Amino acid sequence: MVSEGVFLLHSLIMGVFVTFVYDILRIIRRVIPHGSFCVSVEDFIFWVYCGAEVFLLMYHESNGTLRWFAVLGAVTGMLFYSKLVSPLLVKYVSLTLTKILGLLGKLLLGISRPFRRAFVRAGKGSRRIFRKQKKVIKNKLTFFLKELKMNIKV
């Protein structure tokens, strides 16, 4: 009886853990938007991982036999976590991470401003130099072609 109680407790914890891992995926998706292909791949990997974890739990705790009270325990753990903790965790962690990443973006934008100005000025200067060099090269090539034509006729 004690071992079944421990097994039920492990099933509850497994349900909470599986839902927590999925919340991490949800937070990442809110902070960094994903396309449907990436979401599908992430979900596939998540479900393969969760299936392996549940299989290992069943294998170690009940020698691989499916115990319905363990399934009920896992579902109860999932519902408990998803109703009490999940909404607040996903909302506030994703909001906090979004704010932090926004501030980091603004900070990096401010730090890089002098470098961007220097690159823009260097780009404008190099365009002027390239235009002048282009004219010089064109004039030399034209002169070379004229000389070549004159030498071939002789």
Image (cartoon, rainbow, N blue to C red):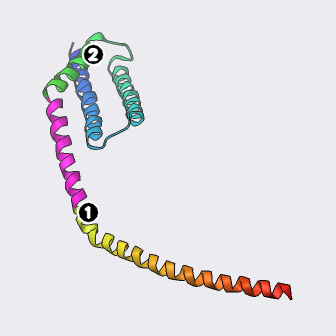
> Is most of the magenta stretch helix, strand or loop?
helix
Residue drawn at (35%, 27%) of the image = 50
In front of the other: 49 or 68: 49
Mark 2 / mark 1, whichever is N-terminal: 2
Q: Could you tell whether 123 is left or right of 13 in the image?
A: right
Residue drawn at (30%, 36%) of the image = 25
Give the quadrant of residue 20: top left
Give the quadrant of residue 111: bottom left
Spatial CA distance of label 2 from label 1 is 52 Å
Q: Secondary structure at mark 1?
A: helix
Amino acid tagged 2: Ala
Q: Where 33 sits versus 72, above or below?
A: below
| 88 in magenta | yes
Q: Which is more foreground, mark 2 or mark 1?
A: 1
Residue at mark 2: 70
Q: Could you tell whether 81 is left or right of 39 in the image?
A: left
Residue at mark 1: 109
Residue 23 spot, x, y in % from top left: 25, 33
Within 10 angstroms of label 1, few (less than 14), some, or many (20 or more) residues?
Answer: few
Magenta stretch in the rendered image? 85-106
Q: Where 118 sits versus 32, above or below?
A: below
Q: Could you tell whether 83 is left or right of 30 in the image?
A: left
In front of the other: 52 or 97: 97
In front of the other: 146 or 26: 146
Q: Where 4 sits versus 92, above or below?
A: above
**Disc sitting over residue 55 in the figure:** none
